[in-house]
Amino acid sequence: MGVTQWPGGAAITTTLSGMVGWARKYSGWPMPFATACCGIEYMSTMSSGYDQGRFGWERPSFSPRQADVMIVIGTISLKMGPVLKRIYDQMAEPKYVISMGACACCGGMFDAYSVIQGVDTLFPVDVYVPGCPPRPETLILGYMELQKKMQAQQLEARG
Amino acid sequence: MTKLELQEKLINDIKAQFKDHVKHAEVDHYGMPVVEIDPEIHVELPAWLKNSEEWQFNHFTDITSVDYLNRREIRFEVVVHLRSHKNNIRIRIKTPVGGENPKLPTLSHTFIGSHWTEREVYDLMGIEFTGHPRMTRLLNPDDFDGHPLRKDFPIKGKFRGSFPKGTVISNKRREPNVAAPTHPKPLDQLMPRTVQEQKREVMKLEYERKLGLVKDEPEQTEAPEETADAKEEGGDAK
């Protein structure tokens, strides 16, 4: 990226991939799939105290069709697994997944027959946010890590 | 009559009514009448307790089951709790069930409240209740394999909740596995009325008569004839 001075102002030259990545990382529309207590921490992150809108993640989308990032928040039971997979399949490409909390990452303390041991058994996960539950700062760090990934991805890798 | 005397009278009544089918009956140390019975009277005893004028066990509290793997000859035990609002006493009825596929007749035609709890027992312990209108799983998915509250169910391993790698998980909506209803009539028609319900109906009818909402039957039959006559007369006059 370089800045060139012109008589009427300045122009920035960059690659198309870099520009698309820059636009994409500041307009990620998250879809919260909250099933457990981590959802309270997500609500805190979403509202004005921590304000996830600062990162361009302004609009929580409660429909998978209009979402870019799915945040899986909480315990996923065996009966919920196919439903979650169905929702993931409905999202348009490019799509990203954040797995928030110990239960979504690896089953957490529910080492039982009725709980899925990590949502990565259902679909690929981009960022794992550990904690029981993670503080809002941890989730924001997860956002920023995913933003780095969005920026670094080449166009053809995005699908 | 104290509560203990009432409970002992209940035990003696049950023994007199169902003689040989009652294996063991006593008031235990916690003041709870406990009755162990044969599977043959698993429906008859609660129905008799519900419909008898004296006892009126009209509140179905719960139905659960116990797994005595390697501890008893007959592996399972179904436990029913009933309560009588009239006498303010409770009763615990235990029925042993054995075999590879344990089966018992359903209580849901006597107590409608046992509908879902019997499904829960079937789901988690695998005891089938014959004659139940919808004997399917209540909590686990319909295609779940095994009954998780049995003592020989593996805590870890095959049933650990995660899908093994390479499993294709269908995102299609699954059709629920619903068995055909075994009784054509709905449950509320099959259930016999309790003594209290019958009394309540009579009281309701009397109350409505007082208010004049319901007229007696002879008045209703006479009334349309009079009006019909009046109309005819009126028609003649016109």
Image (cartoon, coloured by chain):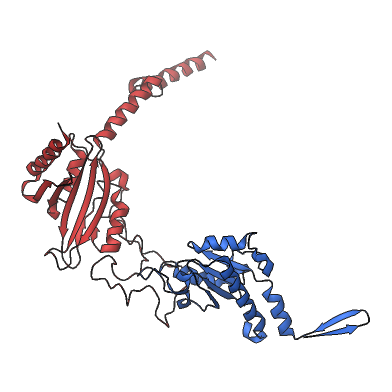
What percent of the width, then of the height, locates residue A155?
A: 67, 85
Residue furthest toward the right? A7
On the question of residue B108 being in view, the answer is no
Q: Residue at x 11, y 46 (%)?
A: B26
Q: Is residue A132 above or below residue B9?
A: below
Is residue B136 left or right of A63 when viewed as pictured? left
User: For residue B210, which quarter of the picture?
Assistant: top left
What percent of the width, then of the height, locates residue B91?
A: 19, 45
Q: Check the rendered structure and report the hue given to chain B.
A: red
Front-lying residue, A62 or A14: A14
Q: Is residue B229 above or below residue B166?
A: above
Is residue B175 left or right of B83 when viewed as pictured? right
Q: Check the rendered structure and report the hue given to chain A.
A: blue
Q: Is residue B10 above or below residue A64?
A: above
On the question of residue B159 being in view, the answer is yes
Which quadrant is the N terminus of chain B positioned in?
Answer: top left
Front-lying residue, A105 or B136: A105
Q: Residue at x 27, y 65 (%)?
A: B149
Which quadrant is the C terminus of chain B positioned in?
Answer: top right
What percent of the width, then of the height, locates residue A21?
A: 69, 80
Residue furthest toward the top? B237
Front-lying residue, B185 or A54: A54
What percent of the width, then of the height, locates residue B173?
A: 46, 67
User: For residue B170, which quarter of the picture?
Assistant: bottom left
Q: Residue at x 40, y 75 (%)?
A: B162
